[in-house]
Amino acid sequence: MLNLTDVYLRQDDFELRANLTIGDGRCVAVMGPSGAGKSTLLSILGGFQTLTSGRLTWHDADISDVPPSQRNVAMVFQDNNLFPHMTAFQNVGLGIAARLKLRKAEVDRVNTALDAVGLAGLGARRPSELSGGQQSRVALARLLVQRKPLILMDEPFSALGPAMRLEMADLARDIAERTSATLLMVSHDFKDVERIADDVIWVEAGVCLPPQPLSEFLASPPSGFTDYLG
Amino acid sequence: MAHRILAITTWPGLIVAGLVTFFSLGTLLSVGLRADGFSALDPFDWAAVRFTVVQAFWSAALSIAFAIPVARALARRKFWGRKALITLLGAPFILPVIVAILGLTAVFGRGGIFSQVLIWAGLEPISIYGFHGVLLAHVFFNLPLATRLLLQGWAAIPAEQFRLGETLNFSSHDSFYHIEWPMLRGLISGIFAIIFLICTTSFAVALTFGGGPKATTVELAIYQAFKFDFDIGKAALLASIQFVICGVAAVLSLWLHLPQAIMAGHDRVVQRFNISRVDIRMLDFLWITLATLFLLLPLSAIVIQGSQSFFLLPETVWLAAGRSLVTALGSAVLAIVFSLALALAALKFRWLEGVGMLSVAASPLVMGTGLFICVFPFIDPANVALLITALVNAVMSLPFVLRAIGPAVRATEARFGPLSDSLGLVGWARLRLVVLPRIRAPLGFSAGLAAALSMGDLGVVTLFARPDGATLPLQIYRLMGAYRMDQAAAAALLLLLLSLGLFYIFDRGGRANA
């Protein structure tokens, strides 16, 4: 259970407020107009931004001041998710040991993860030798070996075409289920959201609304949502 | 962004910053403290101060004056060998001074080709010693630098401006005043300041071509005060004056606008219209030919003269080459470690990179003198001559090396910092797996630069070395002093090959399979 209690962040003239709880194992879409604060919400959860005030707890432990590397969080960014000078195998292996000194069993885990995302036999390739979709799969394979209970994705597949994006969204949800992780995904595409989300967090004008089940959200959407869909 | 900072500890950077500060300022202080009262400067010393400023002024002015037509011709002409010529323009930066001096002597000296031509035409041959020789050598080194910097200015002029000029029926003359001159006006002062700065620290050129009351730089006067008179008070006073001159020039060059990346490539030929007239074409090719000859003839002279007795070189030369190689490699390692530590710590404390640039204003001879005084009570300085040379060379190359490594480290952190943080990549693992692989190319370039600069350095080692402990440049200087010009040329060829080879290997190694 992830709790945001009176969370408030101020940065120059930008503000973000959140007071909400996210249940374990949920798949949550974060939606809202550009500049509303979706990415900032993820940065806060990932530990890249410190709160001006408020409290962040994970299973009742206060993590407000815990640095990113000590949080039980895995992140997928919009881009630069892979180190271009490392092979796919190494990029995934980083999820197990940052020093890349892997034991036999860990090597097997990396290979199993690559198999699971459909990249069997491509471990030796560098990102430049992989397609856009394959690069996303490498980042997803890393989530499998990281086994973190909270996965944060910030428009992870926005560079992909619509069909490929849906496929990746499915795979992401599948991975979250397999690792019994809670998944938060910022997305601009309502199709992706409909396909995988249990709940929706609506962010608008610096306020994050508590998560609502997708059906309820659609039954009585916030006023900004209809404008957003256009 | 509170958690993003302590990924790599900053203490190595702080230690290096302390070391650089000590080398740049502490050595000056130790020289000053050791002085038993400041003996007043005699007229000879004041002449040295005046000569330093005057020759630096004219060196910078002439280099730029010749560089403008050369750069203009290069910017608008396409010809076979253009790329090779632009690469050649980068060579003097890592060319050992002593090699250039031998080459220039072979071409412009009494027995050289140029003098032969003058005599044949019934004119007096020019003297390569004194003011003229110092200017000649400085223009040889800085004309290419100025040309490369100006070429970047030409490349930065939008092609639309020349197209617009064409629709307005500009002549070549109009294009110059409306389009090219405004660009030049912005660049010239900065280029002038950097060349002025380089020439004020001139030691090896003044040592060989200068000397005497009319052509002694402050650096040379420090050397003489220390080595011949052992007048530490005077050396300290001269060192302070040198520091002020360099400091003023350094502040000016940092303050004035200068294009980045001294060694960056520029291959674009700007599309031009009103330049097909025969006389303009002839003039452009005349400038290109003259510049090429000016650079190539001295180098060719070394290769031709040197190759004759290359395999007859005495053992002392090979031993000196070995010492130089060890020193150069040591200096490269030190420069890389220092700059990396500074650049990483500068992610947190931005001013640390400024500390690394301190040595721009410092004089290697002041550093050498200060270190001599510091180690003298404990060990014989001659025992650590190579170590001190490597250290001083590394510190002196920091301003150039940091310019390559600093931005690369910052870019890597900006791009991969968040991902590395989220993966828990910290400390040594972060350095080994993320930073070093990402900055391989500037790292290789920097190591090559530091190694080549140290390989060719004829400065601080002259203060320390024993007769049997010379580096290769010093050995060449001694051979010249003994009028063994064939051996000197052969040894210079060896030095040239080693310097360029070191640079090539490191630079190439950084870029391979990247």
Image (tube, coloured by chain):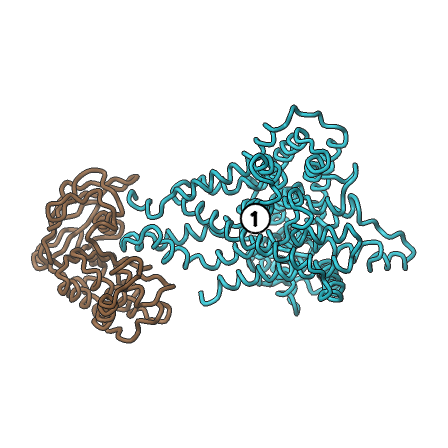
Chain colours: A brown, B cyan
Answer with the quarter of the image where residue B307 lies: bottom right
Residue closest to the eye, B35 or B405: B35
Answer with the quarter of the image where residue A53 lies: top left
Q: Position of residue B389 (x, y in %)?
A: 59, 46
Task: Name the residue at the bottom extreme.
Answer: A121
Instruction: Specify the subunit that label 1 lies on.
Output: B
Q: Is residue B290 visible?
A: no
Q: Position of residue B258 (x, y in %)?
A: 57, 47
Residue highlighted by disc 1: B390
Residue positioned 64% across, 46% down in the render = B461
> In screen coordinates, is A11 left or right of B124?
left
Q: Quadrant of the N terminus of chain B?
A: top left
Q: Is residue B478 visible?
A: yes
Q: Position of residue B332 (x, y in %)?
A: 53, 53
> In screen coordinates, is B235 left or right of B509?
right
Task: Name the residue at the right extreme.
Answer: B122
Q: How many tags in the picture?
A: 1
Q: Quadrant of the C terminus of chain B?
A: bottom left
Q: Kindly identify the amino acid type of the residue bearing the numbered disc 1.
A: Ala
Task: Name the residue at the top extreme.
Answer: B37
> In screen coordinates, is A198 left or right of A85?
left
